[in-house]
């Protein structure tokens, strides 16, 4: 390995990550994440699967027209129709990439594709050649590569490289591989594909056995130079390789893996928080790098060592990932200019109208909470700007509860711009609020999960509530934050209902399912 070599970071949070159950995002939310990912420094951003729906096409197109430094990739199956849609969505990108794929394992070819090996090679070559008529930045993926015959894999890769593929991707699509096994596969492909030197070798791992990061690092050590990852490791089933884990492993252990990335590590934690807040997927406390406990030390012997020298028990400085570095605390007496400046530092470049909305919400929160910190601002912007197109919005909530009264909730909502109100009872205050909201909205979703946590420390912290809803097989996550936990719960439930409504018209479709 050459210490000057870089590992290309290919982020698929907006494509594979969005396929996490319930993690659908609207266009504004996707754009916000895309802008932050460019600020983070990802080399390639897979913005979506344009052939899946008109909404996905429009979102990819908008992102492609906005980003200036990051390559924007669009996924396509090996069909002219898919490739046309992909190119149509990214044609105005500063750096467009078409990413096409077909399965190469016997089980997929026999049962899903119902194609012979020769037919698969022919289809792959035709797709790459056709995509090359639009751009020379073509990536080809052999779906289910880790369960494919290695010799057939080399045959396919040789053919698509000859056809013009600049990147070949070896995916562990179902999270089946073991690190040494996967490293050996990368070495085998590299050694037995005659024209492999003309392409970049990429890997895309899933976490079904909890080995996505280990497999990716093993593959990098074996010669792969592009890692396909997501923020917080979100993705289908058990998720994908986590961007922050790969980047910080390379950053922390250059003595063992002398490779680097173009990632601005100080943007890792803010990006993780943004993705978590927008998708509603909470980062587990013991998650490596970005979990709440990642830099917490409770054991006495650890605390003693930390006081003497942080490096006794911390292999990374939390400032390196942007955790707790340079935070400006604002309060009720802070002005509009200070607010604008701080929001810009956080990555929110707001228009005058948007700033007015956030300033009003900031003042309302400051009347309830003495100190406003970054997590509070993220919650305010998410609710005030990114959810402006919601069908259901909370105007008023009043809850009566206690040991000697029947819990009752009075709710006023705006539904498509019209105000409605009503009241209802329940087994507790949250049940009463949810029952009333369901009655007013006419929805029949089932609550699968309810969780609550605090955004920050302190008794005046905003409560963060996450719900998981199911309606006719559609699953959506909802999130709400407020100093009042009842209000936060109502906001989360309404956010989940809005996501369900969005999913009804903008379904998140796995390309493998089509």
Image: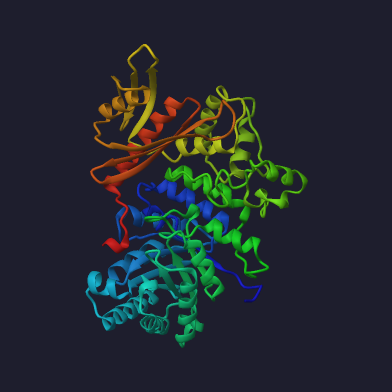
Residue placed most toward the observer, 465 or 99 = 465
- Residue at 46 percent across and 82 percent down: it is 188
- Residue 467 is at least partly visible in this image: yes
Q: Place residue 3 in its image quadrant.
A: bottom right
Q: For the image shown, how many numbered marks are present on the structure?
A: 0
207 on left or right of 324: left
Q: Place residue 84 in its image quadrant.
A: bottom left
Residue placed most toward the observer, 429 or 42 = 429
Residue placed most toward the observer, 387 or 514 = 514
Above or below 179: residue 157: below
Across and down, in percent, residue 273 comes to: 52, 45
Across and down, in percent, residue 101 comes to: 35, 71
Above or below 147: residue 455: above
7 on left or right of 278: right
Across and down, in percent, residue 374 comes to: 59, 38
- For the C terminus, which image quadrant? bottom left
216 on left or right of 294: left
125 on left or right of 211: left
Find the residue positioned furthest to the top: 404
Find the residue positioned furthest to the right: 308
- Residue 142 is at least partly visible in this image: no
Above or below 354: residue 102: below
Q: Place residue 128 in its image quadrant.
A: bottom left
Across and down, in percent, residue 136 comes to: 44, 76
- For the N terminus, which image quadrant? bottom right
**How are the colours assigned in the image?**
rainbow
- Residue at 30 percent across and 33 percent down: it is 416
């Amino acid at each position: 390995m050459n210490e000057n070599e870089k590992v290309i970071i290919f982020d698929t949070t907006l494509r594979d990550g969005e396929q996490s159950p319930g993690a659908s995002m609207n266009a504004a939310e996707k754009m916000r994440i895309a802008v932050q990912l460019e600020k983070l420094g990802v080399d390639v951003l897979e913005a979506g699967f344009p052939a899946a729906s008109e909404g996905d096409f429009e979102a990819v197109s908008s992102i492609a027209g906005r980003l200036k430094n990051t390559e924007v990739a669009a996924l396509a199956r090996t069909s002219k129709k898919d490739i046309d849609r992909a190119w149509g969505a990214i044609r105005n990108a500063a750096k467009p990439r078409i990413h096409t794929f077909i399965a190469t394992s016997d089980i997929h070819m026999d049962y899903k594709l119902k194609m012979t090996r020769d037919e698969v090679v022919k289809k792959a070559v035709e797709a790459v050649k056709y995509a090359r008529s639009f751009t020379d930045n073509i990536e080809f993926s052999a779906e289910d590569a880790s369960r494919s015959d290695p010799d057939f894999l080399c045959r396919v890769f040789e053919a698509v490289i000859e056809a013009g593929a600049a990147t070949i991707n070896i995916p562990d699509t179902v999270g089946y591989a073991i690190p040494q096994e996967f490293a050996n596969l990368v070495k085998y492909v590299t050694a037995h594909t005659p024209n492999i030197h003309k392409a970049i070798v990429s890997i895309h791992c899933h976490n079904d056995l909890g080995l996505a990061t280990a497999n990716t690092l093993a593959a990098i050590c074996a010669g792969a130079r592009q890692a396909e990852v997501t923020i917080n490791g979100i993705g289908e089933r058990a998720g994908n390789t986590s961007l922050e884990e790969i980047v910080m492993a390379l950053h922390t252990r250059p003595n063992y893996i002398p490779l680097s990335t173009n990632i601005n590590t100080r943007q890792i934690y803010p990006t993780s928080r943004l993705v978590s807040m927008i998708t509603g997927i909470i980062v587990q406390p013991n998650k490596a790098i970005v979990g709440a406990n990642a830099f917490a030390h409770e054991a006495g012997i650890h605390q003693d060592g930390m006081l003497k020298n942080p490096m006794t028990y911390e292999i990374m400085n939390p400032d390196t990932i942007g955790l707790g570095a340079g935070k400006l605390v604002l309060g009720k007496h802070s002005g509009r200019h200070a607010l604008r400046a701080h929001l810009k530092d956080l990555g929110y470049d707001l228009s005058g109208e948007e700033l007015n909305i956030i300033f009003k919400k900031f003042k309302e929160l400051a009347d309830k909470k003495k100190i406003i910190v970054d997590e509070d601002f993220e919650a305010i912007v998410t609710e005030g700007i990114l959810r402006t197109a919601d069908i259901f919005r909370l105007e008023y909530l009043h809850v009566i509860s206690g040991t000697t009264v029947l819990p009752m909730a009075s709710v006023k909502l705006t539904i498509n711009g019209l105000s409605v109100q009503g009241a209802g009872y329940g087994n507790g205050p949250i049940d009463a609020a949810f029952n009333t909201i369901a009655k007013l909205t006419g929805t029949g979703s089932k609550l699968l999960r309810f969780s609550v946590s605090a955004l920050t420390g302190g008794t005046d912290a905003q409560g963060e509530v996450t719900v998981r809803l199911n309606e006719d097989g559609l699953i959506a996550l909802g999130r709400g934050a407020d100093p009042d936990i009842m209000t936060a719960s109502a906001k989360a439930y309404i956010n989940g209902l809005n996501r369900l409504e969005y999913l009804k018209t903008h379904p998140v479709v796995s390309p493998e399912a089509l």
